[in-house]
Amino acid sequence: MKVYFIKGIYLCIVSLGLLGQLSSPIALLLGLCYSFLFGNPFKSYSHRLIDYFLKISIVGLGFGMFIQETIQTSIAGLGITFFSILFTLLLGLSLAKILKLDLKLGHLITSGTAICGGSAIAAISPVIRAKSNTISVALIVIFSLNSIALFVFPAVGQWLHLTQEQFGLWCAVAIHDTSSVVGAALNFGDEALRTATTVKLSRTLWIIPLSFFSMFLFKTKGEKIKVPYFILLFVVAIIINSLQILPVSATDFIVLLSKRLLVTTLFIVGSTISLRELQATGTKPIVLAMALWVFISLFSLLYIVY
């Protein structure tokens, strides 16, 4: 009976998210509280659901964007994207050696910080033949910092009086995982959301050259490189909206549902974070992740503002 009650609470919170009764920070906070109190009764499915829901949400948000502004935003974010990825990778590899951290774990944390959190870790791990425990530690550390970012970034953005475009660009560069990027931007404003989504997805494409670099670094060959094909669907959605193939009422409804699904995804993300597992990771992975996160946050903020 207790198990059914715990699962029932979980499903009720998911329902509230889908009905639009939760904000991004509240959804994540509920997920964290739920995990700390009850654990996660659907843990074996959670990461897969996060992956599917996030991709569906991103594609849906494309129905609220236009081709010209998307191209302009992507070009505007190209310089900071390239340099932030390059410097983060160099710093991460150096710090991993200084900390005497397992190089594969250090590389996964660095890749997740440099590009797109869990998606980058999932793409790079088979390329370097990382063990399941190594992958789990990297994901736990990255998702934990993402949770902090969702609360900290909007507050800092308002304190510094960042514009919608500046905040969206900062989120896309400095927050690891796409779910938290879009969640933080959604909490700041619609223009920030459009900017953050566009730049982050452009950034996600860097998984491909990073996979080849990882293959060279760890001397692995013949491994299949994962390509983020859902980005093509995102582009198709933008084209459909730009050509006004669907009525405005339909695209508005799709965008609304996508935002609600994204908020629900943040609850699921929070429910996957275990305090016990985080404590078991040790200090070195956390030190590396924190150092990289502080660096990329300050570097990108200074780049954007000045």
Image: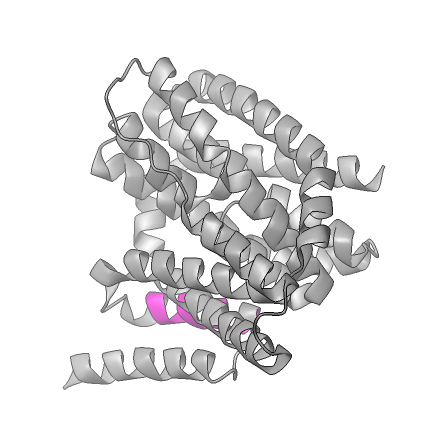
Region rendered in magenta:
25-35
Image point 39% across, 19% down: which residue?
A: 100
Furthest toward the left, the residue is 1
Residue closest to the eye, 269 or 225: 225
Query: In which quadrant will I find the C terminus?
Result: top right
Q: How is the image coloured?
A: one colour
Q: Main secondary structure of the magenta part?
A: helix
Residue closest to the eye, 190 or 264: 190
Name the spot of residue 165 as percent of width and height, x first.
76, 53
Q: Is residue 281 visible?
A: no
Residue closest to the eye, 192 or 306: 192
Quick check: 201 above or below 161?
above
Quarter of the rendering containing residue 88: top right
Name the spot of residue 296 as percent of width and height, x first.
63, 35
Name the spot of residue 19 as percent of width and height, x first.
47, 85
Image point 27% across, 32% down: which residue?
A: 126
Residue closest to the eye, 279 or 294: 294
Quick check: 36 above or below 106?
below
Name the spot of residue 68 as percent of width and height, x first.
72, 52
Residue 19 in the magenta stretch? The answer is: no
Query: In which quadrant will I find the N terminus?
Result: bottom left
Quick check: 187 above or below 302?
below
Q: Is residue 87 visible?
A: yes
Using residue 253 as the reference point, say whether residue 34 is left or right of it.
left
Quarter of the rendering containing residue 217: top left
Using residue 188 as the reference point, say whether residue 27 is left or right of it.
left
Image point 36% across, 64% down: which residue?
A: 271
Image point 22% across, 33% down: which residue?
A: 131
Residue 26 in the magenta stretch? The answer is: yes
Using residue 42 as the reference point, say whether residue 54 is left or right of it.
right
